[in-house]
Image (cartoon, grey):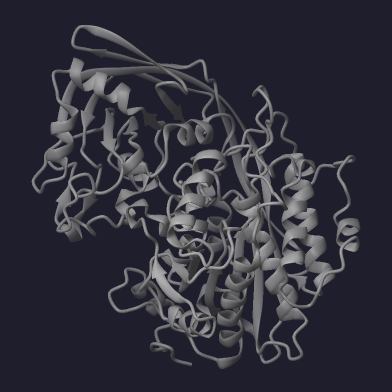
Amino acid sequence: MESPAMLRATSLSIAMLALCACGSRDPAPQAAGAAAPDARSATAVAGNHAFQDAITAGDFAAHVQELASDGFAGRGPGSVGEDRTVDYIKAQFARIGLQPGNGGDWFQTVPMMETTADESAVLGLKVGGTNQQLKFGEDMVVGTRTGQARVSLKDSPLVFVGYGVDAPERDWNDYAGIDVKGKTVVMLVNDPGFHGHDARLFDGDRMTWYGRWTYKFEEAARKGAAAALIIHDTAGASYGWDVVRNSWSGPQYDLRAKDDPTPRLPVQGWITGEAADALFKAAGQDLAKLRAAAGRPGFRAVPLEANASLELTSRSVEKRSRNVLGLLPGSEKPDQAIVYMAHWDHLGTHEGETGDAIYNGAVDNATGVAGILEIAEAMRKAPTPPKRSVLFLAVTLEESGLLGSKYYVAHPVIPLAQTVAVINLDAMAPVGKARDLVVVGKGSSQLEDLLKAAADRQRRRLVEESHPAAGYYFRSDHFNFAKAGVPALYIGSGSDLIEGGRTAGEAASRDYNEHRYHKPGDQYDAASWKLDGIVQDLEAVRSVGEILANNGEWPNWRDGNPFKAARDALRPAAGARGK
């Protein structure tokens, strides 16, 4: 899931990932499409396993074991790992009997910029008559999205802007009364109201879009800031500093500026809570008191009487990555489509690390790719073809900020107005059957009515994610479709396990987050993985897509959902569940 914001910390499959600028760290990336002479043939691998028509644990395991093997080198975009991954997915789509989903092509090229910062950079702070030197990785992480080889800060004044939010509809503006042009803004992660547990502010403990680090950097850029630094805290971010450090080190990926018009900062990054405490103390401020003040209406930004300086050199190169698309054409309405999606990328190979340096990403997200392959097989081999088309979309660059899906939404193969719904699989939990099924962002759309019927047949209940403050709904690829108006369903495996109940589910979640999430330990383990629960999850979401592919209805967002207006604009003549 998107790093660093993607730590699924509670409901298991949600807990088994999470964060969007992070990226992989491959030592010698190649252009996508370059030869990989030592790669195993995906076609040969497909021939070595007797795949069944139905969704089975054995088929699912075969896909995960292959995608998460060392031969795929951590599935880093722009690397030999990408070549092996997309070739495997293409071969499986072809074996299943799908058609190339991008006209006559299996791939959609995603132009990208790879930027690698010099990690010897030091962030210098002049404050209170002292000089503080923040080291990359230890005290801070920074990068640039400009593509420039060198960016500089020279005595840039620091301003604490609370949560860095300007939300007119909520009568909240942390930038009110202050000009931050050319300055360095320092801000808190999450939403106003989070640290003070004030349910009256924003959505209380449920993170909104304003709590996401991506929003905060974009807003700082809109305000003209020269740099922005987010103060890390584990509770507010929902992941530790090690996730931030791992995700922001090495090559970082982005769309080209001409493909992505969102504003960009010259410098953006994070500082540790400890570094922030020292900074504020030296500036004669109390961070704890300012944190409390920032969570109350009427907060006003506070200049810190401190300056920041930085010389950041980076190596930028334009590359390309690929989304993989397989299409099951509809028999009656082929121009309308349901989309099943999962991201194929992970964090690649980290050269120079002691021990295992391959970040295999078995749960995150070989499981999601295996899931859409299994659903594709079942739907393609069904006795009757669907009336509407079904598009199976494996996207790249999720770990770098949901970029592959962002590019697809800007360049859709099926027009968004003709896209019935999106079902996203990201980090499925191999922990066995559960009594519940998590709907991330529960209460959002009418898709949940169809999912509830499927869960009822399995004698399971739908529940919301147990840690809504982490903002998981904004942290995976369906979100780009949602912003464009397309109803999106994002599930997480349940945490009330048949064997061991919630105690076992929470223990499994903690174990994954502490020992495997965005670490080399995220590997397939035949001895410990229990896949019968994942099979149930896949059957449930397969049912949703199968019904929509045949009933002709157009599901919508619930009244009051912020994405409903965009859907209504896409399909003004179609009422709720209209045809």
Which residue corresponds to the image point at 74% horizontal and 85% vertical from the top-left? 382
Q: Is residue 260 visible?
A: no
Lateral position of residue 163 relative to residue 62, left or right: left
When the figure is inspected, residue 230 is found, relative to residue 326, above or below; the finding is above
Which of the 4 image quarters holds residue 445? bottom left
Which of the 4 image quarters holds residue 320? top right
Query: How far across and down, in percent of the image, does residue 451 sit?
Result: 49, 79
Lateral position of residue 133 relative to residue 370, left or right: left
Which residue corresponds to the image point at 53% horizontal and 85% vertical from the top-left? 457
Extreme residue toward the front, this view: 500
Q: Is residue 492 visible?
A: yes
When the figure is inspected, residue 547 is found, relative to residue 311, above or below; the finding is below
Which of the 4 image quarters holds residue 208? bottom left
Query: How far across and down, in percent of the image, does residue 325 sit?
Result: 70, 65
Which residue corresponds to the image point at 30% horizontal and 37% vertical from the top-left? 224
When the figure is inspected, residue 560 is found, relative to residue 165, above or below; the finding is below
Query: How far across and down, in percent of the image, does residue 131 sit?
Result: 29, 8
Lateral position of residue 60 relative to residue 418, left or right: right
Which residue corresponds to the image point at 69% horizontal and 53% vertical from the top-left? 322
Q: Nearer the viewer, residue 176 or 65?
A: 65
Q: Nearer the viewer, residue 131 or 263?
A: 131
User: For the image shown, how many numbered marks are present on the structure?
Assistant: 0
